[in-house]
Structure formats: structure tokens, C-alpha cells
Image (spheres, rainbow, N blue to C red):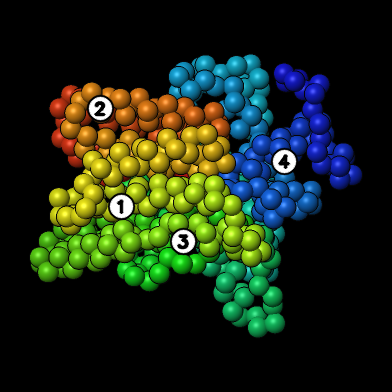
């Protein structure tokens, strides 16, 4: 089996164990090293946890197969065109994509079988290996590459159960060391970013949206912490992730209170809490966060002004999207502020445009771009609304070119559907968090 350009392949990994693998596996391992490792992290570096998985994969079959499946799936996606790609269809795929798609399915099946065998082999008293956690995380990313629709939540539920199991073993074994840096980084990513953004656009019956999820409380963070670069996969500040998660939980609680016909005081308390978090989010200082982030990562160096400004704009994009999301949770009861919804939408679109040429940062903007597109109905002038729809589609095309993740196409299809319904005169709720968008478990990152 051959692929275009295969004669030009350079295997970056020179580990003798790699050379003992078959040619196809070596190809996908190298592809993973060259393309995938920098895809799901803000800044690539020697500390990149995705690249640090490679030595472990050479000794762990489930992890090796999941890496190969992920690489094959991404390679298959590169054969699609943005304007002709249809999620879950290979009708427009090239020959190389069809071959790689077959490889991805085969490696995925082998990864799941090997993972199941590995878990069966573990005794109840054994510690769950970091490679097991990594395998599950990569299977989640495989679902993202395949569309970002459902599937990922099943893997996430399994990952959370394993995390809880590891924690219980750690507590019961006083002399046992905590997991490695790799394991801790992967667990932090699962807890903070996948679960947070997955819950934000999932059906209200999602198991990740319960009242006690993650234990986030209103006002529980002052927003001044600096994440490790290992954990900064999306460039979204920790405080804003907490805000998004809080609003997701409030959406669940407010809907639950209304369905249960609770008295007005209960619903009012929920709304007041949401308003308080909106006010805290509004005061978040993106510039201070960006300055502190870069200083922390540069061993005392303050970072150049351009870097700080760009990272500040990325943070502001997430902040503005978070405000739009939080206001939508309580709808017309949102508090009056200095910025109207239409002004927030235009501000968010301008931030996205300003980062267009910053590939490293722009690739992190799917969630904010989707939120902007979902709220274009706030723009009252039809010509302006149409112009911004074209801008959002162009931004999504740019994201597709950078990532080749089918969840970009998922986001595109959702927005197009909502815009069509709006144009036909459907209620504005069709463009909101209360509409058809939340009838599935979407993960748009």
C-alpha cells in the first residue's frame, strides 16, 4: 500500500524499537510526531505530553494502536475539501483518504481490543497505568477527528472512572507516589478542558452536567493563576474554563428547577448566582493573565509585547464567548451591562479576525467561533448578518485547513442549519442554547 509522497518520508524517531515495526506503523508514528503532537496543544515544546507518549507507546500495545489510529484518521481527513466534506461520509474522499480511513478503522478496533485485554489483565489492587489513561484520551481525540459527535462522552466516562480509581488507590497507599507528570497532565486535561467544553454544548441529560460536577462554585477563583504550558492545550485561562463550567451547571439547574415547578425563590437564587458569575467574568483581566502566563513559562522573562498582546486577544476571545454563553443561560433575564449582545458578537468576531494569521493561536478558536456564529441573530441589519455569516464560514474553513478535524465540519453544519431556520422565520431560540443545538453531545474544541 502506497501513499502520495511516501518516497519523501522522513522518520523523525530513530529509536531502534521503531525500526522493528512494520512500515505502515512507522509511517503513522512519524506522522503523529510531525503533525498530531502540535495540533492539540497551544505551544509545542520538549514538554509536549503528546510527544512524550511515544517512548511509552513502543512498550504498550493499546497506546501504540491508538496513536496509529489517530494519525491514520487525521491523514484520511486531509483528503477532504471543506466545501464538499460531509461528516460520516467518504463520498468525496480521495484514494489516499480511503486507504487511510481503512487503516484508521483497523487500528481503532485493535486499540479498543488491546485496551480491553489490558484492563482485564489488571488485578483490582493494581494501579491503573498512565498509558491506559493516555490510550483513552487519544481515543477521545479520535472521536474529535471523526466528528466530535457522541462517542467521546463514553470514553470520558470511562476515563473519569479510572481517575477516581487511581485516586482511591493513591489515598489507600500512603507510600505510593502520585502519577507521573504525563499522567497528571492528561488527567488535568480531561477534568478541565474536555469535560468543560463538552458539557457546555451537550444535551442537558449529559452525565457531565450534574450539580456537583467538578465542584466549581461561584467566585471560587480570582483568575490570577498561571497554568503550566503542559496543561494549556487551548489557551483558555483556567478562570474562564471555570466560568464556562459554572454556566453549564447553572443551565442544568435552572432547567431542572423549572421542570420540577420549584417556587420562584429557587429559580431566582440560581439566576442571581449566574449573574454574579457573569459580573466576575466581565472583570477578568486578560492582559494580566497573558503577562503572568508568559512570565511563568519564560523563567522570569516577561515576554515580548507582541506575544503578550496576541495571547491577551486569545483570552479575550474566550472571555467574550463565555459572556455570550453565560447570558444565554438566563436569556432575557441577563443583567444590563455596558455591552449589548450585538456589541459582544462584533467584538468577538474582531478578535477572531485579529488572530487569523497567528496559526498557533487561531487553531484554538473553534469554540469561540462557534459561539459567535450561534449568536449572529443579535445583529439586526440583515446585510451585516449575512456578511458576518460569510466571515464565520471563512474562519471555519481556516480552522479546517489548520486542523483537519471533522468537528469543524460538525460546527459548520450546526450553524448552517440554525441560520436556515432563522431565515425561514423560526423562533430565535433555534439559534440559542435552548434550541436544537443541544439535542446531542457535542464536543467542539
Q: Is residue 124 left or right of residue 211?
A: right
Figure check: 288 above or below 3: below
Q: Nearer the viewer, residue 35 or 379?
A: 379
Residue indicated by mark 2: 384
Query: In the image, which is nearer the foreground, mark 4 or mark 3?
Result: 3
What element does badge 2 sit on? helix
Lower position in the chain sequence, tag 1 or tag 2: 1
Counting other residues with Cα less than 10 Å from the Cα at mark 4, is it few (<14), some (14-19), or many (20 or more)? many
Q: Which residue is painted at 49% across and 49% down in the image?
A: 309
What element does badge 3 sit on? helix
Residue indicated by mark 1: 323
Query: In the image, which is nearer the foreground, mark 3 or mark 1?
Result: 3
Figure check: 62 above or below 242: above
Query: In the image, which is nearer the foreground, mark 1 or mark 2?
Result: 2
Residue indicated by mark 4: 33
What element does badge 1 sit on? helix
- Asked if the residue under mark 3 is in contact with the one under mark 2, i.e. CB atoms within 8 Å, the reply is no
The image quadrant of residue 402 is top right
Rendered-image quadrant of the N terminus: top right
Q: Which residue is painted at 66% across and 37% down in the image?
A: 35
Amino acid at each position: 500500500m502506497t501513499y502520495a509522497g511516501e518516497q519523501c518520508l522522513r522518520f523523525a524517531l530513530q529509536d531502534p524499537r521503531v525500526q522493528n515495526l512494520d512500515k505502515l506503523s512507522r509511517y503513522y508514528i512519524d506522522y503523529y510526531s510531525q503533525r498530531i503532537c502540535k495540533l492539540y496543544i497551544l505551544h509545542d515544546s520538549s514538554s509536549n505530553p503528546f510527544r512524550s507518549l511515544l517512548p511509552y507507546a513502543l512498550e504498550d500495545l493499546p497506546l501504540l494502536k491508538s496513536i496509529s489510529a489517530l494519525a491514520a484518521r487525521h491523514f484520511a481527513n486531509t483528503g477532504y475539501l471543506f466545501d464538499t466534506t460531509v461528516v460520516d461520509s467518504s463520498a468525496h474522499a480521495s484514494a489516499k483518504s480511503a486507504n487511510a480511513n481503512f487503516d484508521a478503522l483497523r487500528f481503532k478496533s485493535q486499540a479498543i481490543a488491546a485496551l480491553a485485554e489490558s484492563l482485564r489483565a489488571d488485578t483490582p489492587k493494581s494501579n491503573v497505568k498512565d498509558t491506559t489513561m493516555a490510550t483513552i484520551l487519544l481515543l477521545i481525540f479520535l472521536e474529535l477527528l471523526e466528528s466530535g459527535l457522541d462517542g467521546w462522552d463514553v470514553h470520558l466516562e470511562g476515563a473519569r472512572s479510572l481517575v477516581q480509581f487511581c485516586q482511591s488507590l493513591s489515598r489507600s497507599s500512603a507510600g505510593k507516589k502520585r502519577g507521573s507528570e504525563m499522567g497528571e497532565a492528561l488527567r488535568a486535561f480531561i477534568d478541565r478542558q474536555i469535560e468543560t467544553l463538552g458539557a457546555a454544548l451537550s444535551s442537558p441529560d449529559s452525565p457531565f452536567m450534574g450539580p456537583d460536577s467538578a465542584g466549581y462554585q461561584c467566585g471560587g477563583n480570582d483568575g490570577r493563576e498561571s497554568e503550566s504550558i503542559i496543561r494549556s492545550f487551548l489557551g483558555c485561562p483556567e478562570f474562564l474554563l471555570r466560568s464556562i463550567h459554572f454556566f453549564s451547571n447553572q443551565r442544568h439547574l435552572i432547567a431542572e428547577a423549572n421542570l420540577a415547578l420549584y417556587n420562584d425563590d429557587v429559580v431566582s437564587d440560581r439566576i442571581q448566582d449566574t449573574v454574579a458569575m457573569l459580573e466576575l467574568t466581565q472583570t477578568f483581566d486578560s492582559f494580566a493573565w497573558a503577562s503572568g502566563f508568559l512570565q511563568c513559562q519564560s523563567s522570569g522573562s516577561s515576554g515580548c509585547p507582541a506575544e503578550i498582546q496576541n495571547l491577551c486577544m486569545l483570552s479575550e476571545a474566550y472571555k467574550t464567548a463565555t459572556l455570550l454563553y453565560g447570558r444565554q443561560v438566563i436569556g432575557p433575564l441577563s443583567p444590563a451591562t455596558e455591552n449589548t449582545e450585538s456589541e459582544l458578537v462584533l467584538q468577538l468576531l474582531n478578535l477572531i479576525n485579529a488572530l487569523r494569521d497567528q496559526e498557533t493561536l487561531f487553531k484554538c478558536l473553534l469554540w469561540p467561533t462557534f459561539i459567535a456564529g450561534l449568536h449572529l441573530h443579535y445583529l439586526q441589519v440583515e446585510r451585516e448578518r449575512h456578511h458576518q455569516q460569510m466571515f464565520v464560514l471563512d474562519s471555519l474553513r481556516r480552522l479546517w485547513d489548520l486542523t483537519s478535524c471533522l468537528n469543524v465540519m460538525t460546527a459548520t453544519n450546526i450553524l448552517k442549519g440554525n441560520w436556515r431556520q432563522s431565515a425561514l422565520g423560526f423562533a430565535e431560540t433555534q439559534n440559542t442554547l435552548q434550541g436544537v443545538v443541544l439535542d446531542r453531545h457535542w464536543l467542539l474544541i
